[in-house]
Image (cartoon, rainbow, N blue to C red):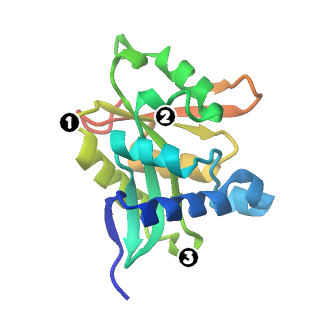
């Protein structure tokens, strides 16, 4: 068995495996016990959208041989309208003032979603993928921002461990509660 490699997703077969991991881990596909203990993802994408996102900022994957074991979706601001469940999140985070500037004026990178396959959990792949993401994009973007479904306590703990800090909590127009977190890439882990 080959070691797990962290790299950028650029090939169609990798993007298709990302979509499959999304499909089996979306909140509607997992039972309540799994959602609570293992976490879940809230949005799904399609291949054309994932290809467009990759052209703007390639996502990070954990891959063993040709099998994608995890992904960390990079999403630039231009895709704020492309995933309906995320539109309200982009609007909210753009309007937040951070360090004397509206976040929407700072050119941040959105971590659109992170997921690790069930068989690969417990290996700190999320940490490794985020470290790689930061290495790839910290010169282009000062911050990485993501919103976590407030019910997803596992994801909240993982993001806190990695260095994200809570920026805001709010309820979206659809009634879903979110925790908005930020990771300052240019000056260490502090907010």
Point out the image quarter for the C terminus.
Answer: top left
Secondary structure under tag 2 reads strand
Question: At 58% from the left edge and 47% from the top edge, which residue is drawn?
Answer: 45
User: How far apart, in angstroms, are the residues tagged by discs 3 and 2?
Assistant: 27 Å
Q: N-terminal of the two: label 1 or label 3?
A: 3
Viewer-proximal residue, 85 or 121?
85
Q: How many marks?
A: 3
Q: Residue furthest front?
A: 48
Residue 43 badge: none
Percent position (x, y) of residue 68? 45, 69
Report which residue position mark 2 lands on. 181
Percent position (x, y) of residue 140? 24, 34
Viewer-proximal residue, 163 or 7?
7
Question: At 65% from the left edge and 34% from the top edge, which residue is drawn?
Answer: 85
Q: N-terminal of the two: label 2 or label 1?
A: 1
Q: Residue furthest bottom?
A: 1
Point out the image quarter for the N terminus.
Answer: bottom left
User: How far apart, in angstroms, are the residues tagged by discs 2 and 1?
Assistant: 20 Å
Report which residue position mark 3 lands on. 119
Q: Is residue 105 left or right of residue 44?
A: left
Q: Are marks 1 and 3 in contact (CB under 8 Å)?
A: no
Report which residue position mark 1 lands on. 139
């Amino acid at each position: 068995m080959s070691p797990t490699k962290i790299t950028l997703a650029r090939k169609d077969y990798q993007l298709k495996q990302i979509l499959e991991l999304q499909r089996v881990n979306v909140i509607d596909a997992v039972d309540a016990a799994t959602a609570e203990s293992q976490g879940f993802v809230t949005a799904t994408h399609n291949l054309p959208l994932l290809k467009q996102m990759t052209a703007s900022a390639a996502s990070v994957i954990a891959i063993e041989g040709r099998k994608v074991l995890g992904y960390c979706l990079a999403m630039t601001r231009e895709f704020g309208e492309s995933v309906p469940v995320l539109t309200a999140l982009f609007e909210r985070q753009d309007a937040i003032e951070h360090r004397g500037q509206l976040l929407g004026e700072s050119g941040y990178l959105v971590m659109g979603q992170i997921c690790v396959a069930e068989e690969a959990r417990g290996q700190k792949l999320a940490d490794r993928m985020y470290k790689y993401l930061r290495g790839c994009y910290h010169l282009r973007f000062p911050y990485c921002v993501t919103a976590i479904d407030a019910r997803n306590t596992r994801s909240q703990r993982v993001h806190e461990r990695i260095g994200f800090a809570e920026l805001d909590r709010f309820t979206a127009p659809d009634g879903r509660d979110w925790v908005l977190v930020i990771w300052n890439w240019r000056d260490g882990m502090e907010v």
